[in-house]
Image (cartoon, rainbow, N blue to C red):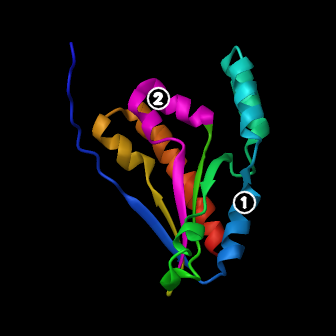
Amino acid sequence: MTTLQTRQIRVERFSIVSSQPFDTVVSRIEAEIGHPDMKAFGGKLASTRTAAELEAAVGEAVGPSGLMEFVRFNLGEVLRKEPEYKDRLSLRLVIGNPVVMKEMAKHVPDAASYAPVTILIDARADGVHLSYDRMAGFLAAYENAAALEVARNLDVKVEALLARAAA
């Protein structure tokens, strides 16, 4: 039997605009997040047997912010193929922490659809925009207090990272 469900999800976008150069903003974020070799990291995670081993493996991979980079998409490189966007700088980073994702997904399995999270760093005429869609906004519709607490803590961590990068 197939069940069809539709759920309304509210998106809360956090944005901050920096007067710093694009490369400076990106460098500040890169300095605070881990950059593990994802193939090796995946193997390490697969070999863990306990929550404590998982936490230790993740602890080695994250940066000072407690977050790590999973993948990046250089959107500017694609946009610059059009002549009118020849100077466009735009980068999408998918960052997070597998332990945090696990803690949310224990309570709300759909949380794994939203974590790790995306941050957008986009140079525009008025400055470098750093944007993040809040995890608590995604999870609010599920009405689970435990997952929301984890999500709010993640939001605070990501927003603080973006504020430091923008300063």
Residue at figure coordinates x 66%, y 81% from the top left = 21
Could you tell me which secondary element the residue under label 2 belongs to?
helix
| Total numbered badges shown on the rendered structure | 2
- In the picture, measured across the screen, residue 38 lies left or right of residue 155, that is right
The residue carrying mark 1 is: 30
Question: Does 119 lie within the magenta span?
Answer: yes
Within the image, what quadrant is residue 147 found in? top left
How far is mark 1 from mark 2, CA to CA?
Answer: 26 Å
Q: Is 17 in the magenta?
A: no
> Left or right of 101: which side holds 37?
right
Residue at the spot 55% in from the left edge and 67% down from the top edge = 78
Locate residue 29, reporting x and y percent: 68, 62
**Residue 8 place in picture, x, y as percent:** 23, 44
Say what amino acid the circle numbered 1 marks.
Answer: Glu
Mark on residue 99?
none
Identify which residue is drawn at 75% across, 36% down: 59
The reply to whether residue 53 is visible in this rendering is: yes
Asked whether the viewer can see residue 52, the reply is no
Nearest the viewer among 31 and 156 is: 31
Rendered position, 59 above or below 121: above
Magenta-colored span:
98-124
Dividing the picture into quadrants, the one containing residue 51 is top right
Viewer-proximal residue among 36 and 78:
78
The three-letter amino acid code for the residue at tag 2 is Ala
Seen at 75% across and 30% down, the residue is 57
Instruction: Please say if 99 is above or below 167.
Output: above
Instruction: Please tell me the numbered disc located at residue 105.
Output: 2
